Amino acid sequence: MVTTAADNVVPVTVLTGYLGSGKTTLLNRILTHEHGKKVAVIVNEFGEVGIDNQLVIDADEEIFEMNNGCICCTVRGDLIRIIGNLMRRRDKFDHLVIETTGLADPAPVIQTFFVDEDMQTQLSLDAVVTVVDAKHIWQHWEADEAQEQIAFADVILLNKIDLVSETELAELERRIRGMNAIAKIYHTRNSELGMDALLGVQAFDLKRALEIDPNFLGEDAHEHDETVGSIAIVEPGTLDMQKLNDWLSYLLQTQGPDIFRMKGILNIAGDDHRYVFQGVHMLFEGTRDRPWKSDDERKNELVFIGRNLDADKLKEDFRACLI
Ligand SMILES: Nc1nc2c(ncn2[C@@H]2O[C@H](COP(=O)(O)OP(=O)(O)OP(=O)(O)O)[C@@H](O)[C@H]2O)c(=O)[nH]1
């Protein structure tokens, strides 16, 4: 899973967003943009007319449609099969975008790239990009899918800003930030965003430092409006690796379904290297990272994004792992 540009792996962007939020508009942008990348796209539509083929051919892109049902039910088998076919034409593209349907939970798509060994050697998850309809999101704010799409995202486009006032937009951003402290949030019209912010983000690369909104970290008692939220732990001190392992395994066994994503940089006792980890539901990967630099502040930073998380309990259990 950990990859660098030098590896011959294909970066994969997972594109999510509620119905009508602007995913197709964004996809068209990606396909027609002069970014020098050849992008293959897998779309999952229910009998709708897909992206215009002419456009696809002109843009030197490849599109594959999954028409056999919901991506979240059949995802692993179908996705692996389609990607398998796609990889036979590996020379034809250098980035893959998977558009999930408006209602799909993005987790199974993301997990495919964590669990399947074949997938891991050939592809690397780049980022989850979620398009949010800034005007109409409130109508389905309570829907699990809408919340999960926001919670899983690395990049969020608050789209259709022409339809809302600045105040409304600020309020939406505040609430979304409370749910997801790690995503980069952009304000867009017609899903207009620079390609650098979309493709090649490397949000799942363990080697990249954890990026949490400093404002979020600064807030001690973060107010939560939603059942889905982010919890950040920033603590100095050194951790007992065994205790940490036990705690994290217990946490994932008991709360895995409710923990959508987690990431962290840790200071392990007796090790002069940083330990970095990330997880998606029950799936976890951690590795020894670069050495701490002399001017680094050796502290532990963790972020959990999930449903009904108990901040006090998480912090207490974390502290119990310190030496
Ligand atoms: N006013 C406004 N309309 C937009 C904007 N972005 C997209 N739209 C329109 O919103 C509608 C839905 O956009 P799509 O890109 O098709 O959305 P989608 O997420 O692919 O929709 P589904 O395929 O139904 O999930 C289209 O009519 C777009 O032209 C925007 O920033 N402002």
Image (tube, helix red, strand yellow):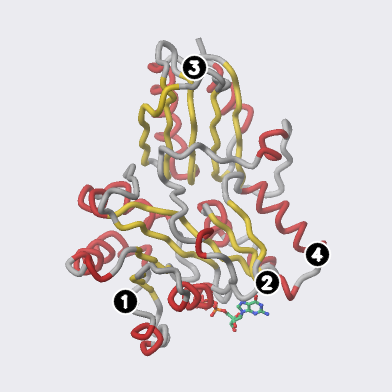
Give the spatial CA distance, label 2 vs label 1: 31 Å
- SS type, badge 3: loop
Give the residue drawn at x 73%, y 33%: 221
Mark 2, ligand 1, within 8 Å: the answer is: no
Question: Would you call the spot at circle 3 few (<14 residues within 10 Å), some (14-19), or many (20 or more)?
Answer: some
Name the foreground residue: 277 vs 206.
Answer: 206
- Of pointers 4 and 2, the one earlier in the residue sequence: 2
- SS type, badge 1: strand
- Of pointers 2 and 3, the one earlier in the residue sequence: 2
Give the residue drawn at x 58%, y 67%: 193
Question: Going by the image, does 60 lie left or right of 239?
Answer: left
Amino acid at the residue labelled 1:
Glu
- SS type, badge 4: helix
- Residue indicated by mark 2: 136
- Figure label count: 4
- Residue indicated by mark 4: 166
- Residue indicated by mark 3: 321
Give the spatial CA distance, label 2 vs label 3: 44 Å
Classify the position of ligand 1 by quadrant: top left, top right, bottom left or bottom right: bottom right
Amino acid at the residue labelled 4:
Glu
Name the foreground residue: 287 vs 239.
Answer: 287
**Residue 263: % across, % down:** 48, 37
> Badges 4 and 2: C-beta atoms under 8 Å apart?
no
Question: Going by the image, does 145 lie left or right of 55?
Answer: right
Amino acid at the residue labelled 3:
Cys
Picture quadrant where residue 165 is located: bottom right
Give the spatial CA distance, label 1 vs label 3: 49 Å
- SS type, badge 2: loop
Question: Going by the image, does 286 lie left or right of 255?
Answer: left
**Residue 214: % across, % down:** 67, 38
